[in-house]
Each structure stands twice: as structure tokens, then as C-alpha cells.
């Protein structure tokens, strides 16, 4: 999986591409962990993510836990991924841009 990282001031934007599933979730989690220490705010730009499995949800929740409510947000979430977040109730917990 390709995950682009962009830093601007104290904000890190990660842009994964493709599916976040059992095979790729560890790569996304590693990118989150490595970059969380370098920034005060982490944004996961989901513009190029077309599918998220339960393993992907776990990575998103873990990023939220590491960064805190004010330090993590999701951006450009597709309709399908948002539907999954709504079904799990995480749409009420996570921050969206």
C-alpha cells in the first residue's frame, strides 16, 4: 500500500491508497505510529480509500486513541466507508473535516 505523508506546521496528513484491510492495516498503523510522534495533529485523508474492513476500523480507532479527540480527524471519507462508520457508531465519536 502506498501512504503519502505531508507535514504542514504541526499537522501531518496521511493519504493511504486502496483498501485498508487485514493485509494493509499493519502498514497504515505503522505510518500512524511513526508520524504521530512528529506532529500535534494527525489527519487521515481517505480520498483514495475505497474499502475499510474491521482491521481498518481498528487502525482508525487506534489513531484516535493515540492522538486524542482534538488531535485526530478523518478527511474525504467515501460514502461506503462513512456508512460502515455509521453502522459501528464511530461516526459519533470521530472528528471529520
Image: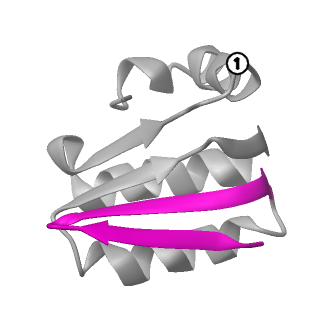
Determine which quarter of the picture holds residue 10: bottom left
Which residue shows up at 58% across the image and 52% down it?
A: 58
Q: Quadrant of the C terminus?
A: top left
> Which residue bears the numbered disc 1?
79
* Residue 13 sits above or below residue 5 on the image: above
Position of residue 71 in the picture relative to residue 84 (left or right): left
In the rendered image, residue 15 lying in the magenta stretch gets the answer yes
Give whichever of 59, 77 is nearer the camera.
77
Q: Which span is picked out in magenta?
A: 1-21
Q: Is residue 51 visible?
A: yes
In the rendered image, residue 90 lying in the magenta stretch gets the answer no
* Residue 76 sits above or below residue 65 on the image: above
**Callout 1 secondary element:** helix
Give whichever of 10, 36 is nearer the camera.
10
Q: Residues within 10 Å of mark 1 (few under 14, many from 20)?
A: few
* Residue 25 sits above or below residue 51 on the image: below
Position of residue 72 in the picture relative to residue 4 (left or right): left
Residue 33 percent location from the top left of the image? 41, 77
Residue 46 percent location from the top left of the image? 60, 44
Amino acid at each position: 500500500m502506498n501512504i503519502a505523508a505531508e507535514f504542514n506546521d504541526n499537522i501531518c496528513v496521511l493519504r493511504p491508497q486502496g483498501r485498508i484491510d487485514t493485509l494493509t492495516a499493519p502498514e497504515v498503523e505503522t505510518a500512524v505510529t511513526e508520524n504521530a510522534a512528529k506532529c500535534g495533529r494527525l489527519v487521515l485523508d481517505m480520498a483514495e480509500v475505497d474499502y475499510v474492513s474491521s482491521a481498518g476500523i481498528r487502525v482508525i480507532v487506534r489513531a484516535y486513541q493515540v492522538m486524542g479527540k482534538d488531535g485526530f480527524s478523518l478527511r474525504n471519507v467515501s460514502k461506503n466507508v462513512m456508512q460502515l462508520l455509521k453502522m459501528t457508531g464511530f461516526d459519533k465519536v470521530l472528528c471529520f473535516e
